[in-house]
Amino acid sequence: PMENVTVSRSPSCTYNEDFKRILLPLVYSVVFILGLPLNFTVIVQIWRSRKVLTRSRIYMLNLAIADLLYVCSLPLLIYNYAQHDYWPFGEYTCKFVRFQFYSNLHGSIMFLTCLSFQRYFGICYPLAQWHKKGGRKFAWVVCGAVWMIVVVICAPTFHFATTGIQRNRTVCYDLSEPSRSAQYFPYGMALTFIGFVIPFLAIVVCYCCMTRILCQTNHMTGLAVREKKDKAIRMIVIVVVVFAISFFPFHLTKTMYLIIRALTDVACGMRERYSIIYKCTRPFASMNSVLDPILFYFTQQKFREGTKLLMDKISTKRDKTSKK
């Protein structure tokens, strides 16, 4: 989400972004309607099996919590953009909603990185003692460290995000006030590098190594080996889809927009084009709140079996009711 009108160094450099009035409420409504029950269900399912929590499920639990917290903030944004960028909820709420977006985004990336490392060690070093000894306590420590890192790197959002007046109405700036574009640029680039580039490269390395090992085990036909291999392949495919839809396009267009936004000699038409490109990809960064629960569903056999059992019970109950 961004301001409806962007103003550069020159006060006359303004452009219309009315397309957000349709695109953003629509996408955020879909994410809210799907993301709220999906993430809540994941949290409930993991909580029910808390006595036998695995390290992967601990990471997924934290991933679902981050997504749920973000989804709960979407009604404010839906109202905001449906009302032509009007923000009546105050400056602190503006700062907090922006913080929720970036903490969810980078928290999701880091927890997906943790899941990828967990799967990497299980595939590439299945007999390593140091990996076997790292149990649930270690996973909780890692999650605590991830939350601390996310809070630290996203905390400057409270400094830069603010409200302002555009076209006689209060708006909630996403990155910063247009007049502070140059000040925001170093932080925006650092956030992208720490919160996306480094985890993304780590995941690429993990998956390359995992793919090599999985290709070498093609001749092994044991049931346990095939199940482990299929589970790893499902995770690789889903994480790649999440990055392809949510993370990579957003960070690519954001980086381009930050560069153009910080320059002083760029024509208004060029600024407008890059702004539209960035803001068209931005709402889809929220789609990870829907895609992450799908990752949990397809990589957790017990959850799929539990869901199928629940659906069977509902179907049986309906049949009995209809017979009466």
Image (tube, helix red, strand yellow):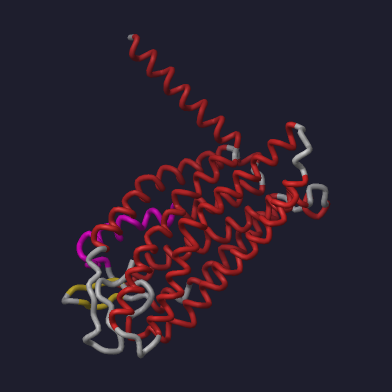
Q: Is 86 in the magenta?
A: yes
In the drawing, does residue 310 fall left or right of residue 227? left
Measuring 37% from the left and 54% from the top, which residue is drawn there?
Answer: 72
Which percent across, then down, holds residue 70?
42, 57
Q: Nearer the viewer, residue 301 or 66?
A: 301
Q: State the image coordinates of residue 103 (x, y, percent, origin top left).
A: 48, 64
**Residue placed furthest toward the top:** 324
Please, is residue 158 above or below residue 324 in the view? below
Q: Is residue 152 magenta?
A: no
Q: Is residue 85 above or below residue 290?
A: below
Q: Residue at x 35, y 9 (%)?
A: 323
Front residue (pair 190, 222): 222
Q: Which residues are magenta?
A: 68-89
Quarter holding the N terminus is: bottom left
Look at the picture and state if 45 lies above or below 61: above
| Place of residue 40 in the rendered image (x, y in percent of width and height, measured from the top left) | 45, 44
Near-viewer residue (81 or 159)? 81
Residue shown at 68%/57% (left/top)? 208
